[in-house]
Image: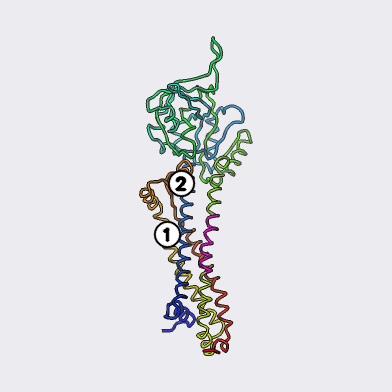
Amino acid sequence: MFRPLALYIGFRYTRAKKRNHFISFIALASMLGIALGITVLITVLSVMNGFDYEIRDRIFGVARQVTVTGYEGGISSWQNMEKEIGNNKDVIASAPFVIGQGMLSKDGVVHGAEISGILPLQEEKISQMQNNMVQGSMSDLKPGEFGVVLGQEIARHLMANLGDKVILVTPQSTVTPIGIEPRFKRFTVVGIFHVSEGFGYDATTAFINIYDAQKLFGLGKDITGFNVKIKDLYRAPMISAALMEQFNGEYFVSDWTYKYGSYLKAIRMEKTMMFVVLLFIIAVAAFNLVSSLVMTVTDKQSDIAILRTLGATPKMIMSIFMVQGSIIGVFGTLLGIVGGVLLALNAPDLVIILERVLHTSFISAGVYFIDYLPSRLEFADVWHVGLVALVMSLLATIYPAWRAAKTQPAQALRYE
């Protein structure tokens, strides 16, 4: 059967013989080094993807993607404005809200909070807050019943449970015969939600019905603004600009990048830096490949000389050692990709096992927003890592192969 000579000889040189076990060991170490570097790099990138996805999912499940508010005071005739917002092709849904500051009190314990007045049915179209309910339901916020949904940290601080009464005091004042008094109202706890310790929602936010909020904050029939859900999160700045132009600049339009853009930029920057830093592991393995091939060239001086006397061209000699290095690089890359994919898919379970064995917790929700290790394998990362490893392996073969091609037969065979 016909075999290309360079491929056949290069493959033969990768196998160990009695006199060059050390060189074969160096070649094996280079292959394992490339595989280890790829495995680690794919796993780390998958974990960074997992953090990125989980944080985005949690942030945009409860945060305002685009917000339309008035520059001064509330927005009147908001039903017509809601229809105009819905006419934008990039908008999925919108929901009116009233927002204000308040102080929650129970049995002498007080806690400050941002009070959001919402329409529960419309809020479900733009938010996943219902999925974060620990007790009760957002739909229990019915107009006129003065129910409140508290964040878990607020409820814990006030020691409030479902059905308990809390007093909400607002900065707005009421004129009475005995003077000016702060406006307050007793509310019934109808729900408790938990998002994540890292975002601060649990300790700073409470929800009431929008009609109750209008009465409490003295807005009449006005609202503070609209929360808008859009189709493409990364086009939020452009959509905000389009909405502002649509309303001729009469309303202030902001988007999530003002508050949360730094989080996602930090994660992406960390992912990029991790990719660059961990590439050095593959670079070290490629350097070992250079050393292995240089020693192979030195060991095969007589073989090279004989091949040259039989008519082998310098190009063929160069091809032989490039094939040998490429075989090591290809097998190392394939081994690394398989190991990286398997480790990335099973990393969360492995971390859980380690936490149980060591009786410790590696990840804190107060720091990382989540309390478990996420992993999200993406084919693009596997492709890029594998391609970079192959290119580095091929580049590592150039110098040793060039050195072999420069071997002079007469000098190599002088002492044979």
Measured as percent of width and height from the top left, residue 12 is found at 44, 80
- The quadrant holding residue 134 is top left
Residue reaching furthest to the right: 249
The structure's colour scheme is rainbow
- Relative to 251, is 285 above or below? below
Asked whether disc 2 touches disc 1, contact meaning CB atoms under 8 Å apart, the reply is no
Mark 2 residue crowding within 10 angstroms, few (<14) / some (14–19) / many (20+): some
Of the image marks 2 and 1, the number of the one nearer the N terminus: 2
Tell me where the magenta segment starts and ends, as one range: 272-287
**Does 276 appear in magenta?**
yes
Near-viewer residue (360 or 62): 360
Badge 1 local density, few (<14 within 10 Å), some, or many (20+)?
many
Rendered location of residue 232, percent (x, y): 52, 46
Query: What element does badge 1 sit on?
Result: helix
Q: Which residue is mark 1?
A: 341
Q: Is residue 295 magenta?
A: no
What residue type is disc 1 on? Val
Q: Residue, x 42% and y 28% (percent of image)?
A: 141
Q: Left or right: 334 with respect to 233?
A: left
Q: Which residue is mark 2?
A: 54
Q: Main secondary structure of the magenta part?
A: helix
Q: How many marks?
A: 2
**Which is nearer the eye, 280 or 227?**
280
Q: Position of residue 338 (x, y in %)?
A: 42, 63
Question: To which quarter of the image does residue 257 belong?
Answer: top right
Q: Position of residue 279 (x, y in %)?
A: 53, 61
